[in-house]
Image: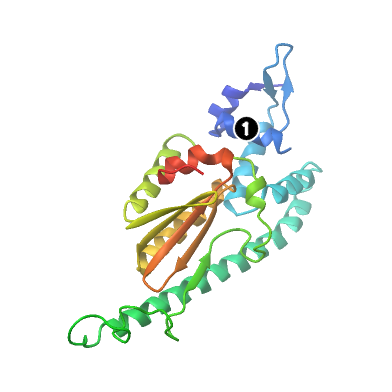
C-alpha cells in the first residue's frame, strides 16, 4: 500500500500542505501519524482530493462536500449522483439569481448613461442635471451580493470555513495578479469590519469582471465574502474574510482584515 507524507501528497495532488491540514481539521481528509508525529496519507488520498477540489469548483460548501464524501465511502456511484443532483440544482438557482442581479445592474447603468447622453444644461451642475442620481426613480442603488449567504443575510458560514485555498503555484500567482490588476482600477478604498471596500467608476463591464473573479475566488476560497453595490455615482466591491485570513486579504487587496 502506497503512503504519502504531507509534502509528497501536496506535490502529487497540487494541493498546498496548509490546505491539507485544514481539510484534516474539517473532517474531509484523514491522516495517520508516524511514531515521530508525521502525517501519513493512504493511496486513496489523491483521488479523494480530486473529488474535493471538483466539488469546490461547483460551489459546494464544506459541509455538503463532507456529506458527499460519506456517501462516496459507501462505494455506490449512483448514491453520490443522487445526492449531488439537488445540490447542483441549488447552485444553478443561485447562479441564475446572480445573473438577474447583474442584468438589473447593467440596466441601471444604461439608464444613467442614457440620461447623461442628452444635452447638458448651461452652467454648473444642479439637482436636475443628471450627474447626481440620488433620489431618482430610475436610479436606485442595486446591490449585487456574491456571497454564498445571499439568500440568508443573517447567516455567515464563511466565517467558519477553513482558511484554505485549492489553488497553488502558478494558478495562485495568476489569481493574485488578476485581483491586483482590478484593484488598481479603484478610485478609492475604505476599511470596513473584517475587510475592505473598493470604489470604482460606474461601469457595467468592470462590474462583470469583478463578479466573475469574485465567483471564481469563492470556488477555491470559501472563507471570502464578496458583495457588489451600485451607488448613485460609483461601483463598490466589498471583500471580507475571517481574521485568520488577514494575510490573504492583504495579498489580494493590500489591506488586513
Residue at the image position 47 percent from the left and 71 percent from the top: 102
Q: Is residue 90 above or below residue 171?
A: below
Residue under pointer 1: 20
Residue 205, given in percent of the width and then of the height, sits at 36, 66
Which of 9 and 184 lies nearest the eye of the viewer? Answer: 184
Place residue 94 in its image quadrant.
bottom right
Visible residue check, residue 33: yes
Which of 196 and 78 lies nearest the eye of the viewer? Answer: 196
Residue 245, given in percent of the width and then of the height, sits at 55, 40
Q: Is residue 6 above or below residue 149?
A: above
Q: Is residue 181 above or below residue 132?
A: above
Place residue 151 in its image quadrant.
bottom right
Q: Residues within 10 Å of mark 1 (few under 14, many from 20)?
A: many
Residue at the image position 39 percent from the left and 54 percent from the top: 189
Label 1: which secondary element: helix
In this view, the residue farthest toward the right is 74
Which of 123 and 54 lies nearest the eye of the viewer? Answer: 123
Residue 71, given in percent of the width and then of the height, sits at 79, 47
Position of residue 10 in the picture relative to residue 191 (left or right): right
In this view, the residue farthest toward the top is 36
Residue 59, given in percent of the width and then of the height, sits at 60, 54
Visible residue check, residue 164: no
- Quadrant assignment for the N terminus: top right
Amino acid at each position: 500500500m502506497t503512503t504519502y507524507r504531507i509534502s509528497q501528497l501536496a506535490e502529487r495532488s497540487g494541493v498546498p500542505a496548509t490546505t491539507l491540514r485544514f481539510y484534516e481539521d474539517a473532517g474531509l481528509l484523514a491522516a495517520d501519524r508516524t511514531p515521530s508525529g508525521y502525517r501519513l496519507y493512504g493511496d486513496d488520498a489523491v483521488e479523494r482530493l480530486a473529488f474535493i477540489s471538483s466539488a469546490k469548483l461547483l460551489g459546494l460548501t464544506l459541509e455538503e462536500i463532507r456529506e458527499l464524501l460519506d456517501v462516496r465511502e459507501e462505494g455506490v456511484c449512483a448514491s453520490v449522483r443522487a445526492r449531488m443532483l439537488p445540490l447542483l440544482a441549488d447552485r444553478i438557482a443561485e447562479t441564475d439569481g446572480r445573473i438577474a442581479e447583474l442584468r438589473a445592474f447593467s440596466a441601471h447603468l444604461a439608464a444613467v448613461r442614457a440620461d447623461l447622453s442628452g444635452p447638458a444644461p448651461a452652467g454648473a451642475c444642479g439637482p436636475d442635471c443628471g450627474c447626481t442620481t440620488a433620489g431618482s426613480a430610475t436610479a436606485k442603488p442595486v446591490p449585487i451580493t456574491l456571497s454564498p449567504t445571499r439568500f440568508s443575510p443573517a447567516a455567515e458560514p464563511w466565517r467558519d470555513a477553513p482558511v484554505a485555498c485549492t489553488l497553488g503555484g502558478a494558478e495562485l500567482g495568476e489569481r493574485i495578479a488578476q485581483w491586483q490588476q482590478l484593484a488598481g482600477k479603484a478610485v478609492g478604498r475604505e476599511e470596513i469590519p473584517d475587510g475592505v471596500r473598493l470604489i470604482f467608476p460606474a461601469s457595467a463591464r468592470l462590474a462583470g469582471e469583478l463578479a466573475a473573479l469574485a465567483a471564481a475566488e469563492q470556488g477555491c476560497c470559501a472563507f471570502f465574502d464578496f458583495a457588489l453595490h451600485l451607488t448613485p455615482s460609483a461601483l463598490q466591491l466589498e471583500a471580507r474574510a475571517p481574521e485568520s485570513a488577514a494575510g490573504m486579504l492583504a495579498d489580494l487587496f493590500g489591506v488586513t482584515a
